[in-house]
Image (cartoon, coloured by chain):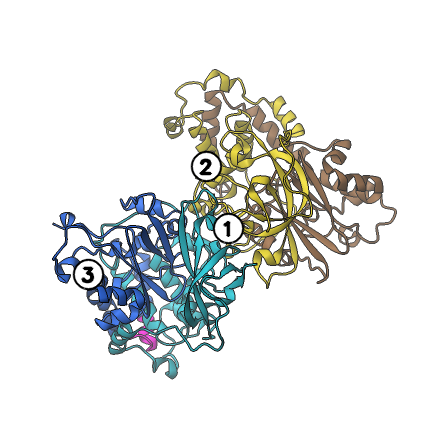
Chain colours: A yellow, B cyan, C blue, D brown
Amino acid sequence: MNGLHDVGGMHGLGRLVPDTGDEAVFGSRSQARVFALTIAAGALGRWSLDASRHARERLGAVDQLRLGYFERWLAGLTLQLRESGVVTADELASGNADGPAPEEVVARRLTAERAGRAVERGRRSDLEAASAPRFTPGQRVRVRPHATPGQTRAVRYAQGRFGEVRVHHGCHVFPDRNARGERVGEHLYGVAFDARELWGGSATGHTVHVDLWEPYLEEAP
Amino acid sequence: MNGLHDVGGMHGLGRLVPDTGDEAVFGSRSQARVFALTIAAGALGRWSLDASRHARERLGAVDQLRLGYFERWLAGLTLQLRESGVVTADELASGNADGPAPEEVVARRLTAERAGRAVERGRRSDLEAASAPRFTPGQRVRVRPHATPGQTRAVRYAQGRFGEVRVHHGCHVFPDRNARGERVGEHLYGVAFDARELWGGSATGHTVHVDLWEPYLEEAP
Amino acid sequence: MTHPDDHTEPPSEFALEVRALESLLVEKGVIDPAALDELIDAYEHRVGPRNGAHLVARAWTDPAFADALLDDATAAAASVGIGGLQGEHLVAVANTPEVHNLVVCTLCSCYPWPVLGLPPAWYKSAPYRARAVADPRSVLAAFGTHLADDVEVQVWDSTSEIRYLVTPMRPAGTDGWSTGELETLVTRNSMIGVEPARSPQAAA
Amino acid sequence: MTHPDDHTEPPSEFALEVRALESLLVEKGVIDPAALDELIDAYEHRVGPRNGAHLVARAWTDPAFADALLDDATAAAASVGIGGLQGEHLVAVANTPEVHNLVVCTLCSCYPWPVLGLPPAWYKSAPYRARAVADPRSVLAAFGTHLADDVEVQVWDSTSEIRYLVTPMRPAGTDGWSTGELETLVTRNSMIGVEPARSPQAAA
């Protein structure tokens, strides 16, 4: 979706406030709990990481600006718990469970031991490729215009712009479909864009590298 | 600037609420006063209409969403009054004038009679062209990438995209410079864009017409 | 994204700020309250969508005027005494059985004041401005307007000082109606392009 | 755009909502509080920028490791026991006298957790994400980092599951330092690319 989470290049978003590097990992205990709740609820397997990103994006523009970072995580998590049926709207309103979750959900509850292993191991997002990559490093490509309300990682600032494929990262889970529960792979490329192609002639001379999946790209004429 | 005023194609901005057509012109007396104050203060000649638009755009993303329409007008007007020196920050804070405005400003105070004439006559924005137009109807063009913090009317959704010049509107005051107090003309064109070039293959088949000044455009290869 | 402002009693913060600024500017000698009254009166009582409705109804009954309106709307409107602020460069676009037009200003709220008056709240709202260019049929549907699939939609984004006026199609069943009668069918919304003109049945 | 949340006493609405949700999920049988404690403990005490600093310092002292890190950072990190969640596909990009690298995630807050821990507030903030891609030199300036005009800036937007780690240049005056000593110069910010590594003088 073309939402306010996609802020690359926007003006008017306020001042950048650097830090000293010595601040706490979490700003509060509540932030820490929201972080851990999000990981632990994700481990139930009812939705993908891309679906979680999209849930936060779907909060709408006002909440993107009004809420703090972990407040958005809490709102996104709540939305997903309700939409997936893990909890009901009534339970969220009352704060009391009407009964336990279905057995197959409870069976996947994350234990402390599994949590530790998940942190150490993670989960790779590369898959076997079903076909040969369409683009090769050195090739000039254009990012396709793309403005559906669904999840995408084709950043708005690169859409319609020309870049050069620099690297083929292999075949990775495609977020646009993964967010809808379809874990399929597409070839992923690192694409380099000249700053002037993104921001115009007055931009400083720099290069922006964006990782883009094959369906986002078309050959440049 | 690449701000939140430039909403063409964005998702997540809330519900569209149609009306019956019978509502009052102004939602309140205060809205009516802000409207009239903005027109009357503009008539003092201290800034252009494009500068007023840019003042409202410069309020920042949070205020774009938080404030109502005439609240933004009030905030933009207040900013311009202060920046132009017509009133001081102290006067705005206290609500009391430290003294009258300079004579040359007071001399341009809008009277009721001049207000009536302004409504009836307006002010044309076309100027004598200093050069021949570079583009002709039927020609394929690309909108240049353009992301400076200044005022522009090159809508973000058309930047980097290909369209077809349909009409040459003549030479009109160029907003990007007019907002900075330089009233110069540039050729203005009506450019048609296929919806799929703007929003991707799943867009409904429609055409979007955008009026774009010559410096916004380059020849398509 | 509608916002309350000064509908409350006691006066809202917005209302107090507006009063304070007007009072300061009057004290500075740069604002004459009579000019404000005049501007408000103009758009509350003199300049509004009846002007546009007159142009459209006239075009429906006078083919030469219809041609003139499409050729140079500023001149055609001036010929019947209509024009002024925010309508210095008018362009009329005609709906036909094949083509439907819709007007928006995605960057702010540009609107042809001399023919339509000041814009309604929805026209100035972010949801309308965002969706009109990307998904105009869903916008039309929100107004209850459903076009056949083969009707081509043309959206006009008012990014310059050119101001667009849609001339809706003349409703069936209005043969022999006078210009004055026809004007009653031409709604503001139909001249923005979100609705057709009223049918005689709906107007009855 | 920083926001207060639960720093206040009595507990903020946010804190109450978080507690209510955790309690509900525990009651539903889908969340084990011990798992939450384990996850928080991991990122508060075990996984953080010392991991990345170790990789960088090792690359400074071991050319073969430096080559391995640039060739396949995931494998190189795994060879010294570093890896895991949000670092399944690591790529290291090296600063040189000619090239400076900067990492951002414009869409959310993607960040290489196994080597840097969880991201700081500014990295997740809209102003950083907006400006890093369009005007990286102004971002660097906000951190007090001023590059020569002829240094080429490369910005890496983490739009996929690839995670980027900047290896800063080894500071002058560190000949003969051990890997452990060098690690103290490698700050988190230098591995995001907003600052150089600390000089021995600054670290003293």
- On the image, the x and y values in percent for residue A129 come to 64, 31
Are there few (<14), some (14-19), or many (20+) residues within 10 Å of tag 3? many
Q: Main secondary structure of the magenta part?
A: helix
> Which residues make up the magenta segment?
C23-32
Q: Which residue is under mark 3?
A: C57
Residue type at mark 3: give it. Answer: Ala
Q: Quadrant of residue B5?
A: bottom left
- On whether residue C1 falls in the magenta region, the answer is no
- Drawn side of residue A124 relative to residue B103, left or right: right
Near-viewer residue (D27 or D65): D65
Whether callout 3 and callout 2 share a subunit is answered: no
| Magenta span contains residue C25 | yes
The answer to the question of whether label 3 and label 1 lie on touching residues, with beta carbons closer than 8 A, is no
Q: Residue at x 38, y 53 (%)?
A: C129
What residue does disc 1 label? D1
Chain designation of label 1: D
How many numbered marks have been drawn onto this rendered protein structure? Answer: 3
Q: Quadrant of residue C42?
A: bottom left
Q: Is residue C157 visible?
A: yes
Name the foreground residue: C24 vs C167: C167
Q: Type of residue at label 1?
A: Met
**Above or below — where is D153 with respect to A28?**
below
Residue D62 appearing in the image: no
Residue behind mark 2? A75
Instruction: State the image coordinates of residue A5 (x, y, percent, origin top left).
Output: 50, 45
